[in-house]
Amino acid sequence: MAIKPAGTLYRGKVGMWSWVLHRISGVGIFFFLLVHVLDTALVRVSPEAYNIVIESYKTPVVGLAELGLVGAILFHGLNGLRVIAIDFWSKGTKYQSVMFWVVITVTVVAVAGFTPMHLARVFGH
Amino acid sequence: MAELSVPTIESFTVTLIVRRFDPENDTEPKWEDFDVEMYGTDRVLDALHKIKWEQDGSLTFRRSCAHGVCGSDAMRINGRNRLACKTLIKDLDISKPIYVEPIKGLPVEKDLIVDMTPFYKAYLEINPFLVATDKPKKERLQSPEDRARYDDTTKCILCAACTSSCPVFWTDGQYFGPAAIVNAHRFIFDSRDENAELRLDILNDKEGVWRCRTTFNCTEACPRGIEVTKAIAEVKQAILRGRA
């Protein structure tokens, strides 16, 4: 039998995984904002350089990454509301799991609605 | 005489994979597997006993009452914190091996035994005793409504299943942890107690209630069914209000 050398991963439920997703999406959004602030600030330095940078974003890879960005922001924002409800609403702890699935459903539906529109734009020309 | 038919009680063989550490010979923990024959009424603790008594006497774990009251045998069973004495083997998936590990976030001393000192230290810091200066002739009276406010948190047996299920506690051993906050809650919301303010002040610390990230692992792990995350949220609210 293959014996795992390390300890097992803790099998937490949706509360734990929502926290993990919240952190990962948060770090991802931070790096996007960092790049976004830098490239937008470039317009003050050199409008030509700014144009070159923005033009370089128009590739399918960045297009797909934008899809991920929309999903991450939606999840992070909605789950943030869920965390606020847990802290400030007296029944928040009782319904945390239900609220998590609401967050996931809204995120998935919104991203699914956005995807065809966005992909048509990315691959359209 | 008619033949007596003695019903046979069905038994099954189950594999336990136990995470072991011998401080005298090992530099790091390792997994070891044992096959044991068990019955439907047996718990994980019974399996550990059987291993210790019949296969390997060096297997080390804590247990006292063996009936879910003393809180000695909290351990990680199939990746979740449980009391070994309250977990029936038949309720687990017995077609697969059962993984048994020490609880996480506290230093392992030997096999399934961890050093509980940091856990008890956090518990002591919140002053887990009634502070009342009045000297009534008889008992201190309390209405059923006032008693109900902290009923849930009186059930704690200090097994550390909650604190050692908390991802924040795993990485930040300075965090008070759910168990200490639960026991603070038990006195903060007790109408007879006079020291709620001090306890709220202690928990309004960088390493206090604000470290809680509401992962609900503690609520899910508690063998007494205490709504731990809810209790922590109530303490957070009390700190914001400035009173219990």
Image (cartoon, helix red, strand yellow):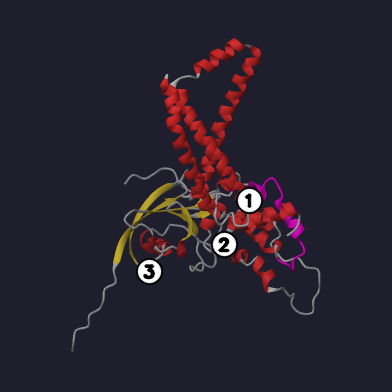
Q: Are marks 1 and 2 in contact (CB under 8 Å)?
A: no
* Residue B2 lies in quadrant: bottom left
* Residue B219 lies in quadrant: bottom right
**Whether residue B211 is situated above or below residue A42 in the rendered picture:** below
Does label 3 lie on the same chain as label 2? Answer: yes
- The answer to which of B227 and A84 lies nearer the viewer is A84
Amino acid marked by disc 1: Asp
Q: Numbered disc 2: what chain? A: B
Badge 2 or badge 3: first in the primary sequence: 3
Instruction: Let me know if residue A65 is in the magenta part.
Output: no
- The alpha-carbon separation of the residues under discs 1 and 2 comes to 18 Å
Percent x, y for residue A54? 54, 17
Residue at image point 63% right, 67% down = B151
Amino acid marked by disc 3: Thr
- The answer to which of B31 and B161 lies nearer the viewer is B161
> Which contiguous range is marked in magenta?
B190-213
Circle 1 SS class: helix
Q: Where is mark 2, residue-wise?
A: B226
